[in-house]
Image (cartoon, rainbow, N blue to C red):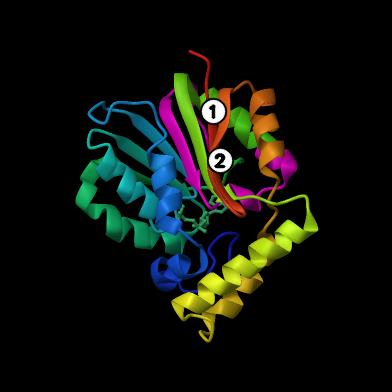
């Protein structure tokens, strides 16, 4: 039985698989990584929620060469892939097994940056709101929270448009016939995306400032906000 967000039963196919089914996956990560206000040479402390195989983690550690990252995930097999990928970064990458919002964030005022990609949309509204509160508490004053994630449209015709766009993307990548496309569809059971607008409001209500959307491509968005300084 897969855990929410594992996507594939075999985590070793995640990296090629996710690029085939999430349009502009690299651009999504880039939009997030371009958004923090911190100088690249500053030694920032980062918490990543739902690190998976460590794709965003590796890009972040490369982009911010003095950063350290605590990379959290509830999936043992995803963390095993991340451990291999991140070994080259030594103790700058610390892997932690646990679930959000129950186990993480577990810090107060500690992080300069909290990031997440393609993971928070598995939580329902109450858990998203609880997570946003806990993320704010875990940030140092002036710290930023940035999330790259699946969002929902309120308009049914835009939801259909987004589905068509993904199907076309998958077909163009040549993965349609692959068995694991069925697995991807089965993982929809765990999805509970919220609208972008709702999440921006919830961030405001949690106490974030400068709340904003930074990038959107159909039902994928990068958004976030800052803890008041
Ligand atoms: C689709 S993957 C995204 C991985 C990576 N962030 C990326 O951009 O490719 C989602 C990850 O979030 C993890 N995840 C989902 N919900 C979680 C939760 N509540 N607590 C901890 N990890 C969670 C899953 O195990 C999975 O590894």
Q: Which residue is mark 2?
A: 103
Front-most of residues 164 and 83: 164
How far across and down, in percent of the image, does residue 50 sit? Answer: 49, 50
Asked if the residue at label 2 sits under 8 Å from ligand 1, the reply is yes
How far across and down, in percent of the image, does residue 164 sit? Answer: 64, 69
In the rendered view, would you say 5 is above or below 11? above
Which residue corresponds to the image point at 59% horizontal and 30% vertical from the top-left?
134
How far across and down, in percent of the image, does residue 42 sit? Answer: 26, 26
The answer to whether any part of residue 68 appears in the image is yes
How busy is the neighbourhood of tag 2: few (under 14 within 10 Å), some, or many (20 plus)? few
How far across and down, in percent of the image, does residue 223 sit? Answer: 55, 38
- Residue range in magenta is 104-128
How busy is the neighbourhood of tag 1: few (under 14 within 10 Å), some, or many (20 plus)? many
Residue 138 sits inside the magenta stretch: no
Q: 89 left or right of 115?
A: left
Which residue corresponds to the image point at 26% horizontal and 31% vertical from the top-left?
40
In this rendering, the count of numbered labels is: 2
Front-most of residues 181 and 168: 168
Residue 225, label in figure: 1
Name which quarter of the figure residue 83 lies in: bottom left
In front: label 1 or label 2: 1
Name which quarter of the figure residue 61 lies in: top left
Front-most of residues 78 and 154: 154
Which residue corresponds to the image point at 28% horizontal and 53% vertical from the top-left?
86
Helix, strand or loop at label 1? It is strand
Helix, strand or loop at label 2? It is loop
Q: 153 left or right of 92?
A: right
Q: Are marks 1 and 2 in contact (CB under 8 Å)?
A: no
């Amino acid at each position: 039985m897969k855990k929410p967000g594992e996507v594939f039963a075999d985590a070793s196919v995640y990296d090629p698989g996710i690029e085939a089914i999430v349009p502009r996956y690299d651009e999504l990560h880039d939009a997030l990584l371009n958004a923090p206000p911190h100088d690249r040479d500053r030694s920032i402390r980062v918490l990543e929620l739902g690190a998976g195989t460590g794709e965003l983690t590796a890009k972040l550690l490369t982009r911010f060469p003095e950063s350290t990252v605590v990379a959290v995930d509830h999936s043992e097999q995803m963390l095993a892939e991340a451990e291999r990928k991140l070994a080259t970064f030594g103790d700058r990458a610390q892997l932690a097994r646990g679930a959000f919002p129950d186990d993480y964030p577990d810090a107060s005022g500690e992080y300069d940056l909290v990031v997440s990609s393609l993971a928070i949309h598995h939580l329902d509204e109450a858990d998203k709101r609880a997570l946003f509160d806990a993320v704010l508490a875990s940030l140092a004053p002036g710290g930023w929270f940035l999330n790259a994630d699946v969002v929902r449209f309120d308009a049914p015709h835009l939801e259909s448009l987004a589905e068509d766009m993904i199907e076309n993307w998958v077909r163009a990548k040549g993965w349609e016939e692959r068995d694991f496309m069925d697995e991807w569809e089965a993982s929809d059971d765990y999805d509970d995306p919220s609208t972008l607008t709702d999440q921006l409001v919830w961030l405001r209500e949690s106490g974030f400032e400068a709340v904003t959307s930074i990038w959107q491509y159909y039902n994928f968005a990068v958004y976030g906000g800052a803890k008041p300084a």
